[in-house]
Image: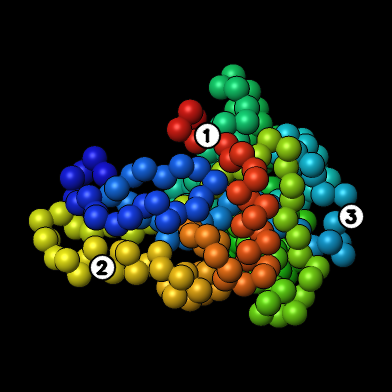
Amino acid sequence: EKTGLFAKNNVDLTVLSLPIKWENQTFLPYDFGQYAFIYDKTKLKNPPKSLRELVDREDLKVIYQDPRTSSVGRGLLVWVNSVYPPDQVMQAWQKLASHTVTVGKGWTETYGAFLKGEADLVLSYNTSPIYHLLNEGKDNYATTELAEGGVLQIETAAKIVERDNICADLFLQFLISPQAQKAIVPKNVMLSVISGEIEPHFDALKTKQLKTNPIDTLSV
């Protein structure tokens, strides 16, 4: 936003339904989720209950993404740096590194390695188990419920500055319409940014998500 490349939109933000209050009139959310570690319930019987436990437990094989090349990896960077005080962050990363299988360039590479059985846990989104359930009929994948809370991933759209085109605002408004959201949610495997029924599994997760308090990443 500070680059000045994007213009403010004229979209009605009052229809948005997110875990946080959204007042930014430049970037418009069109879906969201939360970073989470995914595991196979048939293989891991005692998943970690907190991020600190996940970092400390050397019996857990973990895969995640490089924050230099992956937005998911950057999510973990923010997550760890928000849970640990500054003087403990380096030690936490060193502990995690001791039982890290690999740090991949992107989500596809790392999630694929997890599905091949190369690790107990992989960093992904809390919507990932829904994908397996709806597209593969598999209910063995689950999301860790970590005590410290999680970091939101909100995907946004914006219009370029000096392009006074009413169609841009109309398109952005369309992105948060029920019609568009019903297409975006299952395609992107993320949660809807508006109220209303989309699909029972996504709806249930969103209801749960709205009751949680995500980590304030602005304080990191």
Q: Position of residue 67 (x, y in %)?
A: 49, 47
The residue that label 3 is drawn on is 45
Tell me the CA gap for discs 1 and 3: 30 Å
Quarter placement of the N terminus: top left
- Discs 3, 2 touching: Cβ within 8 Å: no
Rate crowding at label 1 as few (under 14), some (14 to 19) or many (20 or more) other CA atoms within 10 Å. some
Q: Earlier in the sequence, mark 1 or mark 3?
A: 3
Residue, far bottom: 136
Task: Please give left or right for residue 121 compared with residue 47 in the image.
Answer: left
Instruction: Give the SS element for disc 3.
Output: loop
The residue that label 1 is drawn on is 216
Q: Residue at x 48, y 76 (%)?
A: 183
The residue that label 2 is drawn on is 170
- Discs 2, 1 touching: Cβ within 8 Å: no
Q: Quadrant of residue 136?
A: bottom right
Query: Foreground residue, 58 or 150?
Result: 150
Which label is found at residue 190?
none
Query: Foreground residue, 49 or 200?
Result: 200
Is residue 126 shown above or below 79? below
Residue type marked 1: Asp
Tell me the CA gap for discs 3 and 2: 49 Å
Q: Residue at x 66, y 80 (%)?
A: 135
Query: Foreground residue, 71 or 1?
Result: 1
Rate crowding at label 3 as few (under 14), some (14 to 19) or many (20 or more) other CA atoms within 10 Å. few
Residue type marked 3: Lys
Task: Please give left or right for residue 60 compared with residue 209 in the image.
Answer: right
Is residue 204 shown above or below 99? below
